[in-house]
Image: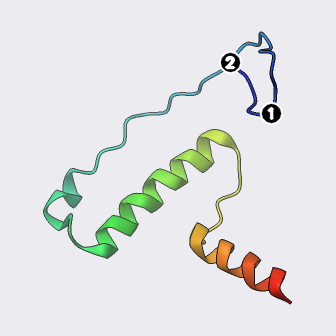
Amino acid sequence: MQPIEDRVPKIRRVGMIIGEPLHFDSYYAMAPDLFAQRAVTDKIMYQIMRLSGQEYVDTYASEVKAKMESEKKK
C-alpha cells in the first residue's frame, strides 16, 4: 500500500473484511425509482458501517461540500 504523497512504497500487510452477500432482487422492478435507489444505497452503507465499525452519517457528500464551501466564503 502506498499513500499518494509518498515516493517510496512501504511494505505492509493489507487486510480485507468480506461480509455476507447482499440481495436486491426485490428492487429490480423499481430500478428507475429514486426511493428504491436510495433504499439500496442505505442497505449498502449500513453494511459498510457494520463491517468497518465507522459511524453512518445520513448526509449526501454534495451537501457536505456545499456547506464547507459556504463556510469558507464567510
Label 2, secondary structure: give it.
loop
**Left or right: 48 with respect to 14?**
left
Colour theme: rainbow
Residue nearer the viewer, 19 or 64: 64
Is residue 60 found left or right of 25 in the rendered image?
right
In the displayed orientation, state which residue is furthest to the bottom.
74
Residue drawn at (77%, 9%) of the image: 11
The quadrant where residue 30 appears: bottom left
Q: In percent of the image, x 53 and y 54: which residue is there? A: 46
List the single residue furthest toward the right.
74
Residue drawn where x is 31% and y is 74% of the image: 34
Give the farthest residue toward the left.
29
Quarter of the image with the N terminus is: top right
The residue pinned by badge 1 equals 5
Q: Please name the amino acid that badge 1 sits on.
A: Glu
SS class, disc 1: loop
Decide: few, some or many residues near mark 1? Use Cα within 10 Å; few <14, some 14-19, many ≥20: few
Q: Position of residue 16 (x, y in %)?
A: 60, 24
**Identity of the residue drawn at 20% across and 57% down:** 26
Q: Reading the chain from its start, which is encountered first: label 2 or label 1?
A: 1
Q: Position of residue 54 (x, y in %)?
A: 71, 49
As displayed, is residue 21 above or below residue 55? Answer: above
Given contact means CB atoms under 8 Å apart, are the residues at marks 2 and 1 in contact? no
Question: Looking at the image, is 3 positioned above or below residue 71?
Answer: above
Q: CA distance from mark 2 to mark 1?
A: 18 Å
Residue 60 at x, y percent in the picture: 56, 70
Using the image, tell me which numbered label, if any, was put on residue 50: none
Q: Which residue is mark 2?
A: 14
Q: Local crowd at mark 2 within 10 Å, few (<14), some, or many (≥20)?
A: few
Camera-nearest residue between 71 and 14: 71
Callout 2, which amino acid?
Val
